[in-house]
Image (spheres, rainbow, N blue to C red):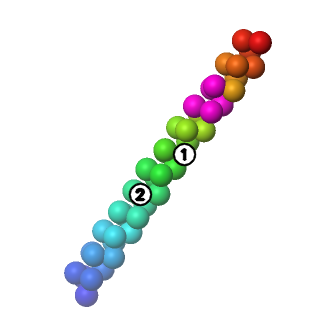
Amino acid sequence: MAQAFREKEISFLVLVEEVIIKNNQLYLSLNMLVYEWLRHDFSD
């Protein structure tokens, strides 16, 4: 019983980790886009 729970717990943590990593990548690319947009906006 405890073993099965442990495996579920681990797979849940892995899932959370993947979501966090994906969100970080999304956030970084959004930051880059905003940065580029602001830079072009102010340079005109």
The residue positioned 27% from the left and 83% from the top of the image is: 4
The magenta region covers 32-36
The quarter of the picture where the C terminus appears is: top right
The residue positioned 47% from the left and 52% from the top of the image is: 22
Please identify the dominant SS of the magenta region. Answer: helix
Left or right, 16 with respect to 29, comes to: left
At label 1, the amino acid type is Leu
Residue 35 included in the magenta stretch of the image: yes
Q: Which is more N-terminal, label 1 or label 2?
A: 2
> Label 2 to label 1, Cα distance in Å?
12 Å
Which mark identifies residue 18? Answer: 2
The quarter of the picture where the N terminus appears is: bottom left
Please rate how many residues cluster around mark 1, counting C-alpha atoms within 10 Å: few if below 14, some from 14 to 19, many from 20: few
Where is residue 28 shown, x and y percent of the image? 52, 37
Where is residue 41 shown, x and y percent of the image? 75, 19
Which mark identifies residue 26? Answer: 1
Q: Residue furthest left?
A: 3
At label 2, the amino acid type is Glu
Q: Nearer the viewer, residue 31 or 1?
A: 31
From this view, report whether residue 22 is shown above or below residue 1: above
Left or right, 3 with respect to 44, comes to: left
